[in-house]
Amino acid sequence: MMREAQVLAVGQEAGSAGPMMVLGVEGDERVLPIWIGVAEATCIAAEQQGIRGPRPGTLHLLATLIGAFERRLVSVRITELRDSVFRAELVFDADTTVSARPSDAVGLALHVGVPILVADEVLDEAAVPGAGVVAGAEQQAGLDEEFRRFRRFIDEVDPDEFGRS
């Protein structure tokens, strides 16, 4: 069975190997921590906060491509944990699924506004007691300030300082 989840926090604990997103399911006291890349964490947090850069990003590109092919993203599913790696799927109309990294799938789900679903088997295997969510929220506050600084940089940067591609 699949259960709908929400992104509770995105951040990095001091001394950890990298950022993680923490998913929670209503009515379940456990949380699902998933290690993700820095770029993906930045993207997910920006989506959560409604921050838009001066140019379209990867999620915008994907959403535009989906629409250009007259398809509709219905949901994303985190389907399994195999060899310590989470697996996800993008679920489109007409029962089409595409394999994806959970971080990309969740970012796209937030961007498009579709449900994030997690398999019970994944929760049973990898979810942990939810006490750490408070720490994740504290990390999020630090990440929020980092985004504000990044946004100021983007707003003030001179494109001529970079090579054109």
Image (cartoon, rainbow, N blue to C red):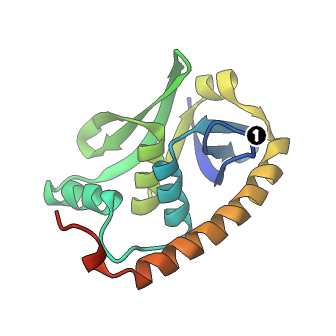
Observer-nearest of 161 and 59:
161
Observer-nearest of 117 and 83:
83
Badge 1: residue crowd in 10 Å (few <14, some 14–19, many ≥20):
few
**Residue 106 in sight in this render:** yes
Tell me the quarter of the picture where residue 90 sits: top left
Judged left or right of residue 70, residue 6 is right
Q: Amino acid at mark 1?
A: Asp
Identity of the residue furthest to the top in this view: 83
Relative height, residue 160 to residue 120 (above, below)? below
Identity of the residue furthest to the right in this view: 131
Judged left or right of residue 76, residue 129 is right
Tell me the quarter of the picture where residue 132 sits: top right
Q: Where is residue 135 shown, x and y percent of the image?
A: 81, 51
Quadrant that contains the C terminus: bottom left
Relative height, residue 124 to residue 48 (above, below)? above
Relative height, residue 19 to residue 48 (above, below)? above
Q: Identify the residue shown where x is 14% and y is 54%.
A: 69
Observer-nearest of 9 and 144:
144
Q: Identify the residue shown where x is 51% and y is 71%.
A: 150
Tell me the quarter of the picture where residue 142 sits: bottom right
Quadrant that contains the N terminus: top right
Q: Where is residue 83 shown, x and y percent of the image?
A: 52, 15
Determine the secondary structure under disc 1: loop
**Residue 115 in sight in this render:** no
Counting labels gives 1
Relative height, residue 144 to residue 16 (above, below)? below
Q: Identify the residue shown where x is 42% and y is 83%.
A: 155
Q: Which residue is mark 1?
A: 28
Q: Where is residue 16 shown, x and y percent of the image?
A: 70, 38
